Amino acid sequence: MYQWVDPDNSTTQLSGKPPVQYRSATGGLRVFVIENEKVIDDTGADVSEAQRDELKLQALLKKAEEDKEVARGKLLQAKRLKVTLEQK
């Protein structure tokens, strides 16, 4: 879960997706990333460029693995559907 204050209307925003400015090199909104009721990232904290790159890489690898699992599930579902259709 991502949490930040919208600069246009000063309201707190919560989303499963980060705001566009999240961890951008140019800075931006202060964003808290909350997982299981624990803050796991705070863009207000200083992070070196190398750490930023490593965090992005970790996030991309995690997303790729999740996408791979979803694709496996869809492939399995498609194979089952094919067998069912062939039996009819």
Image (cartoon, rainbow, N blue to C red):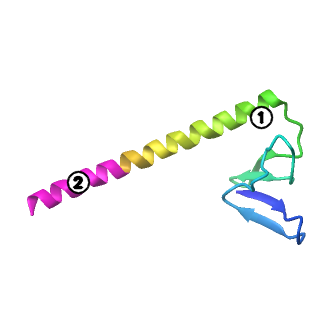
Q: Main secondary structure of the magenta part?
A: helix
Magenta residue check for 84:
yes
Task: State yes or no: discs 2 and 1 in contact (Cβ < 8 Å).
Answer: no
Q: Earlier in the sequence, mark 2 or mark 1?
A: 1
Q: Residue furthest top?
A: 50
Residue 5 at what x, y percent from top left?
Answer: 86, 63
Report the residue at 45% width, 42% height from top.
68
Report the residue at 85% width, 30% height from top.
48
Residue 36 at what x, y percent from top left?
Answer: 68, 53
Report the residue at 86% width, 51% height from top.
28
How packed mark 2 is, by other alpha carbons closer than 10 Å (few <14, some 14-19, many 20 or more), is few
In terms of secondary structure, where does tag 2 sit?
A: helix
Separation of marks 2 and 1 at Cα, in angstroms: 42 Å
Answer with left or right where residue 73 lies relative to residue 8: left
Magenta residue check for 29:
no
How packed mark 1 is, by other alpha carbons closer than 10 Å (few <14, some 14-19, many 20 or more), is some
In terms of secondary structure, where does tag 1 sit?
A: helix
9 or 2: which is nearer to us? 9
**Residue 6 position (above or below residue 51):** below
Quarter that holds the N terminus: bottom right
Quarter that holds the C terminus: bottom left
Tell me the mark number nearer the camera, choosing from 2 and 1: 1
Answer with left or right where residue 25 lies relative to residue 1: right
Residue 49 at what x, y percent from top left?
Answer: 82, 30
* Residue that badge 2 annotates: 80
- Range of residues picked out in magenta: 74-88
Amino acid identity at mark 1: Arg
Amino acid identity at mark 2: Arg
Residue 69 at what x, y percent from top left?
Answer: 44, 44
Q: Which mark is residue 52?
A: 1
Report the residue at 28% width, 53% height from top.
78
